[in-house]
């Protein structure tokens, strides 16, 4: 029989998760700080608990999907976690994940932290490619993996409870960098010069063609040889910096999204690494090394 579970937080993501488990035949007890926001789920078969403590008391498997780590502490303050398996799908930092794990374990619970790599419409759709990183108690993950796999794919990334958040935030950080570049590119073309709808497929194709470079970066990092298989060396790339900056100026576009990366390129070349590609820039970002 399917594992009954408790879900704390019926925001956009919590509601999507609850629907997926309900649809798969799980008994779901929900709690939300603002009760009205849980009512739609009651009509779909969820049990609405009157308090977070009551929701936690209802089931051994407790899933939290709240705004941030502070809201998890607030919601669970006063709940008895002894003997519970707490799965925290609230986005946080690796440090918050580790601290929350210690906090939960001190209260007698096993703990898993999760990082959701999906948006609500992808949840419950096995073809969407959405998944969740999990880290923390390997025993809790083993026991609940089938239940956890209902709303989205599962990727267990280690016993260190900080690792789910670390994977999650690293991927989202790369996404932010990509979106920064996309914003700069669309700003440059100016809709009166080039139609955005004509440009978008070109942009998509170029980003897709460049994406495999991440494997080259990984290969160089692991071999500690940043000159290995270099295609476009940094000296050549740095020579093009004025072109980037002057094009931005000609198009009346602020270079503020691009400039920090160009500065790091220049610094690396100035340090005598013009024969590398971008991998050495990663060292410049390490705040423990000093610049
Ligand atoms: P929403 O803003 O829709 O929901 C936030 C939820 O947190 C609500 O249930 C809200 O309750 C609750 N909450 C906020 N503060 C507190 C508090 N102090 N005590 C108790 N409950 C509180 O956000 P989402 O559902 O979209 O996101 C939830 C988590 O999922 C976040 O950590 C988010 O980063 C993560 N996530 C979301 C994605 C998305 O695309 N939506 C994608 C990947 C991850 P109330 O209704 O009372 O305000």
Image (cartoon, rainbow, N blue to C red):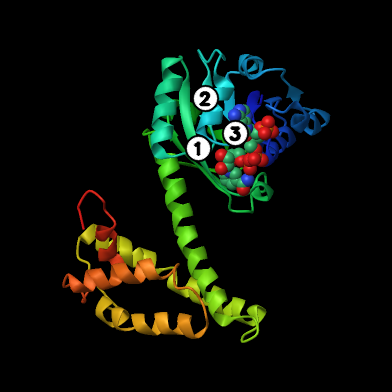
In the picture of the structure, the residue carrying the numbered disc 2 is 73
In the picture of the structure, the residue carrying the numbered disc 1 is 114
Mark 3: few, some, or many residues within 10 Å (few <14, many ≥20)?
A: many
Mark-to-mark CA distance, 2 and 3: 10 Å
Mark-to-mark CA distance, 3 and 1: 12 Å
Percent coordinates x, y for residue 93 in the rendering: 43, 39
Disc 3, SS: loop
Percent coordinates x, y for residue 10 in the rendering: 69, 33
The mark closer to the camera, 2 or 1, is 2
Pointers 2 and 3 in contact (C-beta within 8 Å): no
Q: Quadrant of the N terminus?
A: top right
Q: Quadrant of ligand 1?
A: top right
Mark 1: few, some, or many residues within 10 Å (few <14, many ≥20)?
A: many
Q: Is residue 271 left or right of residue 119?
A: left
Pointers 2 and 1 in contact (C-beta within 8 Å): no
The answer to whether the residue bearing label 3 lies less than 8 angstroms from the nearest atom of ligand 1 is yes
Sequence order check, earlier mark of 2 and 1:
2
Picture disc at residue 66 = 3
Disc 1, SS: strand
Disc 2, SS: helix
Query: Is residue 232 visible from the viewing direction of this image?
Result: no
The mark closer to the camera, 3 or 1, is 3
Sequence order check, earlier mark of 2 and 3:
3
Give the vertical position of 272 relative to 53 (above or below).
Answer: below
Q: Residue furthest right?
A: 43
């Amino acid at each position: 029989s399917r594992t009954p579970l408790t879900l704390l937080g019926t925001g956009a993501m919590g509601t999507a998760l609850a629907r997926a488990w309900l649809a798969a035949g799980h008994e779901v007890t929900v709690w939300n700080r603002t009760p009205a926001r849980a009512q739609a789920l009651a009509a779909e078969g969820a049990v609405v608990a009157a308090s977070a403590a009551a929701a936690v008391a209802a089931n051994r498997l407790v899933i939290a999907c709240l705004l941030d780590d502070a809201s998890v502490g607030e919601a669970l303050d006063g709940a008895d976690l002894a003997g519970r398996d707490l799965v925290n799908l609230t986005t946080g930092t690796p440090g918050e994940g580790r601290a929350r794990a210690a906090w939960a374990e001190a209260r007698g619970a096993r703990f898993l932290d999760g990082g959701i790599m999906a948006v609500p419409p992808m949840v419950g759709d096995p073809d969407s490619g959405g998944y969740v990183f999990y880290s923390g108690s390997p025993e809790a993950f083993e026991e609940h993996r089938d239940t956890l796999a209902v709303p989205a794919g599962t990727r267990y990334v280690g016993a260190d409870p900080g690792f789910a958040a670390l994977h999650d935030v690293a991927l989202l950080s790369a996404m932010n960098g990509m979106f920064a570049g996309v914003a700069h590119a669309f700003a440059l073309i100016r809709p009166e010069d080039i139609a955005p709808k004509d440009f978008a497929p070109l942009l998509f194709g170029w980003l897709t063609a460049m994406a495999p470079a991440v494997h080259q970066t990984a290969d160089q990092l692991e071999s500690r040889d940043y000159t290995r298989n270099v295609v476009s060396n940094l000296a050549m790339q740095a020579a093009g910096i004025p072109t980037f900056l002057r094009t931005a100026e000609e198009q009346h576009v602020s270079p503020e999204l691009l400039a920090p990366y160009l500065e790091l390129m220049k610094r690396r070349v100035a340090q005598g690494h013009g024969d590398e590609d971008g991998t050495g820039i990663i060292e410049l970002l390490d705040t423990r090394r000093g610049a």
